[in-house]
Image (cartoon, helix red, strand yellow):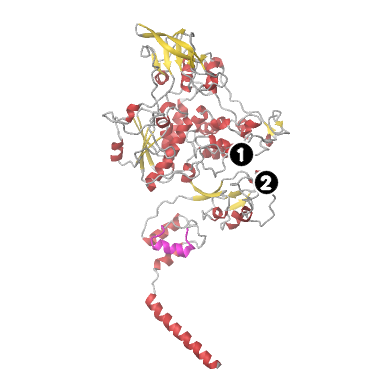
Amino acid sequence: MVTSSILVLFLLGLTAASILAVASRILYVKEDPRVARVEACLPGANCGGCGFPGCSAAAAAVVDGIAAPEVCVVANLETASRIAGIMGAEVQFKEPKVATNICSGGSRANLLFDYKGVEDCRAEALLYGGEKSCGIGCIGLGTCVKVCGFNAIRLSDAGLPVVDWNACRSCGKCAEACPTGAIRISSVTSVLLHLNQTDDCLAPCMQKCPAQINVRRFIQQLRQGDMRGALLTIKEHNPLPLIVGRVCPAPCENICRRKIVDEGVAIHTLQRFVADWEMHSGVRVPLHCNPPSGHRVAIIGGGPAGLSCAYFLRRVGHEPVIFEKRQHIGGMMRGVIPEYRLPKKVVDWEVQTILNLGVEARTGVAFGKDVTVADLEREGFEAIFIATGAWKVPPLGIENDDAEGVLDAVSFLYGVGREYTDLRGKTVVVVGGSNTAMDVVRSSVRLGATAIALVPSIQRKMSANKDEVLRALEIGADLRYLTAPLGLVAEDGAVCGVTYCDLAYDDPEKAKGDPKPVAGTKAFVAADLVIAATDRVVDDSLLRDAEGNPIFKTDKKTGGISANPTTLQTDIPNVFVGGEVHTGRNILIQAVSDGRRAARSIHFHVTQGIVPEPDNQQVQVIPETILKDMHVTYSIPRVQEPLTSVEERRHTFKEEVAGSISYETARKEASRCLRCGLTCYDADAGAEYTLDEDVTVIDAPGRE
């Protein structure tokens, strides 16, 4: 019985072996010898970062043409070159990526409960999303450290992951293991072109900044003495920190959480200090640029939006060319904004920094006259960015507004130091309450004139920055609030005065809506010059062809070129728009923001043929980030910018009104930053200055 059983099993095995032998001959597939050669080049990490299950599968994918020679995230360019040699291919540039921690909170985030479970972030996250109140914050149990096969991550004393970028191989395991998204994989391009998302760790200041500068990080780098790092952080999203640090109205400061307990951090001043540090050194900090991609982009206009777009496109590897109507690059920043606010040498430094990256500039080329969209397309430009600004000041629309001596604000400011060098004994009447109006007023006083401004609102409702209004008042300007011109008086064709009336709000306390003329308040003021500074609008002649037909669809509200508000793509797919030609009169930092947003869209357009809109885009301030009560341990007085004397300001254009602060003063101001996250903040900020006599210890929440 046993013998027969063994014999049956033997015969079954022999039959099966015979069948398999025949099948192997029929079904045998010879392996391409290149697979083994490619695999031999790979490091054998089997990390899966390439997207294939191990190095063998990756090698097979390369040979099958599914993957490129640069498939391995662990290997270097030399390895990719060897693989390319085996395949008879060329190595393409592959942008390096690294893991990045977006969380700044760590143990500072409020606890919801005391977790006592398994020491694994994923396990804790399964319990009501984790023990911390911040849903995107780092849980801190180090799962990312455990899964990293390259020892590239460690936990800091604060329980936050610290990435060694030299050791990181971008395998993505840490990001996959992190249940909150606190660890992410990023590259130069993704950092430069990233738009704020609601699942980012955004302090209120970062949400309010149009350019989305990482305020928290650059201030902490400054506080630690890392000036180079602070500058590079700013330049991730703002290529014009010298300029922005001087003329930006700083909306970020108005929402700073410090204001709950004392005064907001002087973010504007600190940004200028970091940028001044570089300029005063005389040596530009090197900026990384990806190799040329071969994609050419035309930039129409060399103002802040055009310069910013060119800067970001060049840094991610594309080849922008700026076309500028005037003989110099800089737009209104150079020649219209007065020297005492923004010196030409500052603008020239910023412009040259961008040109040094390899950006070409062609001056004296007028869009619509010397070059058209069709011309640029024939020259091989794959995309066009229009940023021609809003240079036209509308006429006053009253009697004699075309008389001699009636000017628009832009023409007057451009003529200061050229046609207008001495206005002593003259009276200049300025109509408007904008920043441009204040520039005209302040420049007129410096030229010796008596300057009067007819402002159609109360002071706090003026569109001008409150500091610019204060500077105008300090040097003796006469700002007549709630007034409006009725007509201009002219003799022999030249203006000699203005008739005007008072205005009033329907509800003076709330001051809402447009104020209306008050009957019986007509008055007269003599004038040698009348400057219209009510607004700046887009010159629509630039938006029409030779026959007068519109080239682009326009926005009825702004008068500018209409475009998708997120991508800035117009109804002509390869044409994008930004700055004041899109928004109408706006602040400079918004133009910088538009330049970066357009660069992102153009990058996708020329590389993928489609412009995706970002997910979870942060457009409004995130409600839970607006705190009402805080407990802060130390109150440190806000830094005050040094100002030139009022007497000096009345006579000079060359001296900047606001000066620079010292290094130690800057670090002290930086210590006031609370390092805010979404809901967390550093209550002990400023501890290193507790021995100073001007530091107060606060024992209770709220203002001292």
| Quarter of the rendering occupied by the C terminus | top right
In the visual, does 114 lie left or right of 102? Answer: right
Q: Amino acid at mark 1?
A: Cys
Residue at the outermost top position: 491
Residue at the outermost front position: 506
Provide the secondary structure element on which disc 2 rests: loop
Was residue 352 drawn as part of the magenta stretch in this picture? Answer: no
Q: Residues within 10 Å of mark 2 (few under 14, many from 20)?
A: few
- Residue 171: image location, x then y, percent: 51, 55
Q: Amino acid at mark 2?
A: Leu
- Residue 225: image location, x then y, percent: 60, 38
Question: Residue 404 occupies which quadrant of the picture?
Answer: top left
In the visual, does 11 lie left or right of 490? Answer: right
Q: Which residue is mark 1?
A: 676
- Residue 441: image location, x then y, percent: 48, 16
Question: Residue 575 occupies which quadrant of the picture?
Answer: top left
Q: At 63% from the left edge and 51% from the top edge, which residue is drawn?
A: 128
In the rendered image, the vertical position of residue 363 relative to residue 616, given as above or below? above
Q: At 50% from the left edge and 34% from the top edge, which residue is drawn?
A: 210
Question: Residue 414 occupies which quadrant of the picture?
Answer: top left
Q: Which residues are magenta?
A: 51-68
Q: Are marks 1 and 2 in contact (CB under 8 Å)?
A: no
| Quarter of the rendering occupied by the N terminus | bottom right
Q: Which residue is mark 2?
A: 111
In the visual, does 680 lie left or right of 374? Answer: right
- Residue 243: image location, x then y, percent: 49, 30
Residue at the outermost left position: 547
